[in-house]
Amino acid sequence: MLVRNLSLRLGRILVLSSLVFGTPAWAGEPVYPPGSRFGFEPPADMTLSRRFTGFERKEGGATVSVVELPPNAFAELVSGFTDANLLSQGFAVEKREEVKIGDNEGMLYTGEQPADPNASAPAIRKWILVIGAPSVTGLVIAQALPDAETEASMRRMVTGVTLRPALSLTQQVDALPFRIGDMAGFRPVRVLAGNSVLLTQGPKDQMQNLEQPILVLAQAVQQPPTAEQRDGFARAALASNQTLKDFVIERAQSYRSNGVDWHEIVARAVDQPTNLPVVVSQTIRFNPDGYLRALGVVREDQRAGVLAKFRALVDSIQMK
């Protein structure tokens, strides 16, 4: 199940590629992506990425990303990462080997994304490292154009990864690319991928049947839609939620506040796992280099006053 759930994410990460050359210059000290437990020694011309958790070359040509998973994911990933499974994600494995990452076990896969016979792009060298630690599994995915980095330099960066102790929830929230000025009665429960946070109102961290209102904030760094496209973009984003159905939009509007463009939708829907009627609030803040999406869900019988709190929290967000 875990391998299937990761397939889309793995596919997206595997196809990240940029097409220029570079040479390595090692910094010598591990650098940790914000909120991540995994640190690397990148070449001097690679910087922390704002698009994903990891590093990318300033001028393009190489990327290294890392995903943190539960500790029991290691065995399932290693058993599920067959040559056929990885090839279906565009990764032709040439070699697999057991490695030690500090005191932790690891499995390193080396190969390439084959060249497209219908395009002029060359094959891309790829490395996948799965790290099994007692408290976390790490999935490191690196790639480079054939002449952008040597095999030795990329292997050194990937297998030289270091693991630091688990960060507190406060430290993870502080590392987010945005700051929340007014929690409006909500509290963070979990940080995801270094750019998203789940918040709730109420005492429980593990919720069933939408016992408490929830709000998810997630930043995306990518080309934002134009002003004419924003309403359609927002409606499509709302409809893409796979846990909700039967949307009935109460209101949808674009607005500008404090020099920032926003789009807000409030809708009624049905929660598919429980079949309970809910109210959904989606607010998207459009930035020059991307957008921040806030999605709040509350049971319809609990909606009184909650939508105003969603809005107060979202209005207080400042980008770092």
Image (spheres, grey):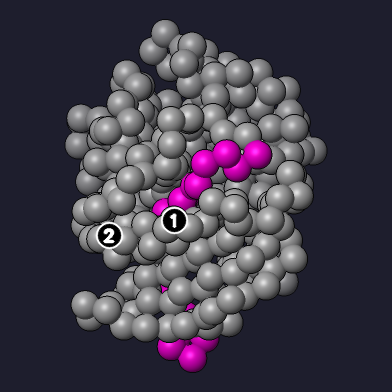
Up the image or down, 158 lies above or below 114; here it is: above
* Closest to the observer, 174 or 254: 254
Q: Which residue is mark 1?
A: 306
Q: Quadrant of the C terminus?
A: bottom left
Q: Are marks 1 and 2 in contact (CB under 8 Å)?
A: no
Query: Which label is found at residue 317?
Result: 2
Up the image or down, 232 lies above or below 64; here it is: below
Q: Give the Cα distance between marks 1 and 2.
A: 17 Å
Of labels 1 and 2, the one closer to you: 1
Q: Is residue 110 left or right of residue 188?
A: right
Q: Residue at x 37, y 83 (%)?
A: 255
The amino acid marked with disc number 2 is Ile
Q: Which residues are magenta?
A: 209-229
Q: Could you say where residue 300 lies in the image, as x and y percent from the top left? A: 60, 56
Residue 246 in view (yes/no)? yes
Q: Residue at x 43, y 30 (%)?
A: 203
Q: Could you say where residue 95 lies in the image, as x and y percent from the top left? A: 64, 29
Q: Could you say where residue 141 lies in the image, as x and y percent from the top left? A: 51, 40
Q: Is residue 49 left or right of residue 72?
A: left
